[in-house]
Image (tube, helix red, strand yellow):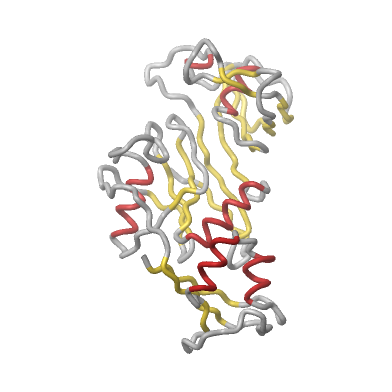
Amino acid sequence: MLHTLTYTVPEDGLTIEAILQQKWKLGKKLIHDLRMQKAVTNKNGELLQWKLPNKKGDVLLFSWEGESSNYISSDQLPLYIAYEDEYLLIASKPRGVTTHPNETGQNHTLMNFVMNYLKGKGQNYGEHVHRIDEGTKGLVVIAKNPIVKSMLDRMLETKTIIRTYEAIVEGQVKNQHGTIRAAIGNDRHHPTRRRVSPSGQLAITHFEVVGRHPEFTKVHAILETGRTHQIRVHFAHLGHPIVGDELYGAKKTPTKMYELHAFRVQFAHPITGEMIVVEDKR
């Protein structure tokens, strides 16, 4: 499929090579594809030299053939978009829905609904940058072309995409704020459960108490690492499982759903540099 991207040069002297390699830190294969396809022109459609400096305010147009996304389009559920521009979108995933298909033919995931939305706009590419658990509701960042996907992937690796979760946990958390440092590994007694284990992967969760009730505590948590079930495991380890999270020892509830919400995401926009702060209002 044909991908397009518009970029306004932010400062004098930047070459296309410097933008792709140093500023955007794209992979060698993607840079090679762009070079071979002569993908970069000015707004008049004239090919540009990659080693020549550009001026602040110059508009670069990228146009290249690349991969499309393979998710089956589905309109089974309405899609809530919390933020969108020409480069990316941030969608709100309902509780009880997985982020992406885990088997061939699956069509009831967030990415199936996203693809239905994008195809309705004549677009065939959308890829999630991270995921959240099926039982967690909240925001997922989705790239709308491979360049932005590559940049957002690197930002996630370098922890410059900050995701904040709101959790309601059982009991009274003693400290008003703190950091949980406890490695997480598989639980050999259960196929999907995780547990704190010295031999597991490093896991760090920062938290702040934002509300108290005689029977529970409301906390905001930020992940420094992104282990499976990290917030659920860490608070259960403290003796404060998330309300409704029976897998990790919480009391049974009528809905059998746990109270965890990925409600805020913030990062510097990979293309414009603008600080993006989005909160899930649902």
Quadrant hosting residue 97: top left
Query: Is residue 130 shown left or right of residue 121?
Result: right
Quadrant hosting residue 152: bottom right
Residue at screen point 40% across, 19% down: 256
256 vs 181, nearest the viewer: 181
The relative height of residue 273 versus residue 193 in the rendered view (above or below) is below
Residue at screen point 44% across, 29% down: 135
Quadrant hosting residue 219: top right
Q: Quadrant of the C terminus?
A: top left
Which percent across, then down, holds residue 11?
70, 78
Which percent across, then down, holds residue 46?
50, 88
97 vs 63, nearest the viewer: 63
The relative height of residue 73 versus residue 217 in the rendered view (above or below) is below
Residue at screen point 56% across, 34% down: 166
Residue at screen point 44% across, 71% down: 64
Which percent across, then down, holds residue 271?
58, 66
Labels in figure, total? 0
205 vs 122, nearest the viewer: 122
Q: Quadrant of the N terminus?
A: bottom left
The relative height of residue 12 versus residue 213 in the rendered view (above or below) is below
The relative height of residue 108 versus residue 70 in the rendered view (above or below) is above
Which percent across, then down, holds residue 257?
42, 24
279 vs 274, nearest the viewer: 274
